[in-house]
Amino acid sequence: SKDIFAVVKALDLIKVILIGHSIAGDEISKFASSYPGKADKIIYMDAAYDRMTMNDTSLPAPAFPNLTTKDSSSVENLNAFVLKVTGVMMPDEELKNTELFSKDGKFVKHVSPDSIQGLIMRGIEHPDYKDISCPALAIYAVHKSVKEIFPFYDSLNDIDKKKADTAFIILAKWQREQREVFTNEVKNGTAKEIHGADHYIFISNPDETE
């Protein structure tokens, strides 16, 4: 949030509208609660969650598909693998900017070291929803079935299917509670649900999101 404030100050902006997806919601909440005079409006794209309340280590994880040589042979094939695993077709430009490819187009590695994700997660805090005074819109993806979280569900064995089923129940309950917390604590907050959407709501459901 201090970085955002530094940019706002450097550009001599009076107030800003912040829109963020996923964990960017943590930055939005922190900025809006820390600098209430600078936040005009804030919009969360499946991002208004208190991640401190979700213990990922207790979440049963089914076996995810392994990346094959064919999957890593091109941007297109890597994107097809991402689609199989997440249900989301990523923009090619995002992959080209976040992943490193060789001159012949083969996937090499992530641009950011794997350690960065751990550092980001260690930096999260409880959102101070009650200190957010500006209008806030939270758009949530609401999953209707386990296959919307695990698109590869049908390829799993019975044990991993049970893990996926349990994970779906835990996640659905947690997400429902998070929507209720946002609605109850953000005084100028509005929560909207898009049923059947995935985490990338602006890709899976662009019209509803707009």
Image: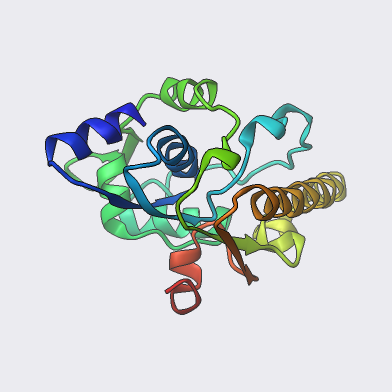
Q: Measuring 27% from the left and 33% from the top, which residue is drawn there?
A: 5
Q: Splitting the image into 4 quarters, where does residue 28 fall?
A: top left
Q: In this view, does 8 lie above or below 150?
A: above
Which colouring convention does the figure follow? Answer: rainbow
Counting from the top left corner in percent of width and height, residue 96 is at 26, 48
Q: Quadrant of the N terminus?
A: top left
Q: Position of residue 142 (x, y in %)?
A: 67, 63
Q: Is 82 above or below relative to 126?
A: below
Q: Is residue 155 left or right of residue 32?
A: right
How far from the left and from the top, in percent, is residue 155?
A: 72, 57
Determine the residue positioned at 47% across, 57% down.
135
**Which is more toward the observer, 85 or 91?**
91
Residue at position x 43%, y 37% in the image:
27
Of residues 5 and 64, the one nearer the viewer is: 5
Of all residues, the one furthest to the left in this rendering is 11
Residue 59: x %, y % from top left: 76, 36
Q: Can residue 31 be seen in this view?
A: yes
Image quarter in which the C terminus is found: bottom left
Give the residue displayed 59% in from the left and 60% down from the top: 140
Quarter of the rendering containing residue 139: bottom right
Residue 84 is left or right of residue 164, and the answer is left
* Quarter occupied by residue 150: bottom right
Nearer to the camera, 158 or 42: 42
Viewer can see residue 74 = no
Count all numbered tags in the image, as a single digit: 0
